[in-house]
Amino acid sequence: MSSQDDVAADAVRPQPTPETGTLRERVLEWADSEVFKGAISLGPILLLLTVFYAVPVALLLVYSIFVEDPFASGLTFEHFSRFVDVSAITSLQFSELSYVRLLGRSIGIAVIVTVLSLVISYPITYYLGQHAPERWKIALVMLVIIPFWTSYLIRTYAWIPILSNNGFINSALTTVGLPSLPLLNNYVGSIIGLVYVFVPFTILPLYASMEGLDSSLIEAARDLGASRWEAFREVVFPLTLPGALAGGVFVFIKTAAAYVTPSLLGGTSGRMYAQVIETQFGTAFNWNFGAALAVILVVVVLGTIWIAMRWGIDVKGSRGLGGGGL
Amino acid sequence: MNTIQSPYDIVASHSAQPIDINTTISYHTTVDMPIGKQSRRRFLTATGGAAALGTVAGCLGGSDDDTVNYFSWGAYIDDSWIQPFEEDTGITVNTETYESNADAINQIETAPEGTYDVWTPSAPGADFERAYQNDLLEPINLDNVPGWDEHIFEEMKLDDFWFDDELYAVPMTFGFDGAVYNHEEVGDLGDEISYDVLWDDEYAGEITSRDDAATQIWTAAKYLGQDPDEPEDLDAIADALNEHVDLVNTYWTSSAESIQIFQQGEASIGTSWDGAYHRLAAEDEPVSLAFWEEGTIGWIDSFCIARGSENKEEAEQFIDYMISEVPRAWFEGPEYIVVSDAVDYTDEELDEYNLEMALENTEFPAYNTDDQIQTYDEIWTDVTV
């Protein structure tokens, strides 16, 4: 490490005593100190994160615990209790817990989208990482990235004429005499749109894992009598799990808070939690309740990921691959 | 193509950029400097600094020169009616767009006073009342707006624009949340329809209505025969909305979205703004427009002056110009009804826009208190989840 080199250099360099050091020497010494270097290199990013990330998140927390204007009105937990209506729980009227139901649905959709994204990503990245000819690899990976050159909004809009009642899929179905399928303005539309947008985010980290996977391990497993499925289950899956988890966690977080896709494709049954947060800030002018809803989302999503990560590590452990982390 | 048409609103509102005086300033500051290799850094610094200063000045309103800071919906901002005003009066109009009344209110509340002069909330209505109560409006001096007496439709001079004998809004455009239906799918239903159709099993899965708590509760109250502004039985309204949601294909939040829903065949009947109907009809979609028997919700977008305006007289001059000099161009642009006789509507247009009937048949929902908004929002969230 360079810090060790610096320490060694400092030991060799004659140390000026505070009495004899001129101002210039003291300034130079200070400029050479670890504290100063640390502040210079870390400072800007710390400042950036504080101003644009920590402060807004802290403000969200602050808003969520005041009746109205922060510090100008009383402290309260009414916004959180509005989310979890205790009287509805005690009277066993669980259907009255509409915000909880909505959050449950959003988390459910996020889980489905994450799993589907991984299921789609595995064969693609397996081919890319293990079998694709070297000279085509870059081009194939580019194909995954190219959609990002177009706006997320436009790509989501593009699904409307594909999924709608008069759209490509349903026109094709009715032409051959099949009944049309309701694909747009319900949760199916949300899920299709979200999987489409987020699949690249599972492909890229999983591809990195697949590329690093030693193909002789798969050959060894096959030589020792493992079927293709067993080889995948015992070798490929555990060894690529870090990539899958990295991509999966990212997709899960983004999907649980999705706003644009469910607004455009989800209709009523595909409505998601972030849309209700938006309503609180926009039409309902209740920033405090909106902030409380956002805080709850952050806590629930982080909690879900924490549980999933623990579960993920256990999966590795049960395969005898834990600890080493490979 | 249909799909290109749908996002039009969003694209349009972004494309209307504020008029940029900053580039001019930075050009003049740097034009005398030698353009050599060494001076490039100084050049860039000076340009950046001047641009930054210009931006700050622009944000603060730049009240030294004659300017009006006009803050509006994208559809109401266009050079074809703003440029002539600038040329005639020498007043510079800086423009900025917003996407919803709530968006505008939030911005005016948080921006420094004097950032905006003229803005155009929907008034009367809950958001206009909120703007007044949160002290976001300045009274308008009618002496500077002669067009009010000369041109504005009498039907549109509502008492709701006045607080304590002072005028706070001048109406500009008008429309309503009418009934739109695909006459090829559901047949000819005439030009007055009952809200019953929104609860009719016959149209299950083909209905669309607006995703807005206050509108839905107002509509359900009308359907049940309750007072829409003071509904007495909210449980019955919640039950009715729960029945309605089962028949709905999807709800819409914007004009563009409702257009797309009809174009894509997702819905064949429902509520929509008259502006959306005119756009659909212009594309030869088989749609018809009708009023609701029980009462149709109307809206008016109005000119208001923002709190702390430092260019109040110029703002009034601009408002007068917009209702007196250019309504024709302006009506032909966004195609909303402009409530000024200076538009000089032709007979065909009066017929097409059904102007007389529209002015007669619309109602403006009363202001909802914060408690009401919260209650309505809870009912609506519960229905749609």
Image: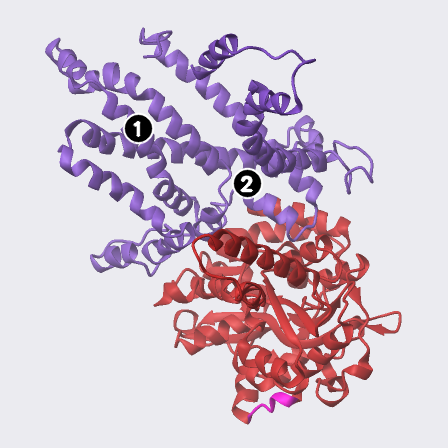
Point out the residue furthest to the bottom here. Answer: B347
Q: Residues within 10 Å of mark 1 (few under 14, many from 20)?
A: many
| Residue B385 visible in the current orientation | no
Drawing shade for chain B: red
Question: In what element is the residue under mark 1?
Answer: helix
Q: Looking at the rendered structure, which numbered label has been put on residue A206?
A: 1
| Residue A73 visible in the current orientation | yes
Residue lying at 89% horizontally and 69% vertically, measured from the top left: B164
Relative to the observer, which residue lies in front, B190 or B167? B167
Placement of the N terminus of chain A among the 4 image quadrants: top left
* B174 shown above or below B13: below
Drawing shade for chain A: purple
Q: For residue A255, what is the image quadrant? A: top left
Count of picture labels: 2
Question: In what element is the residue under mark 2?
Answer: helix
Relative to the observer, which residue lies in front, A128 or A313? A128
Q: Chain of mark 2?
A: A
Relative to the observer, which residue lies in front, A108 or A283? A283
Q: Looking at the rendered structure, which numbered label has been put on residue A273?
A: 2
Q: Chain of mark 1?
A: A
Q: Is residue B214 left or right of residue B81?
A: right
The residue range painted magenta reads B342-346
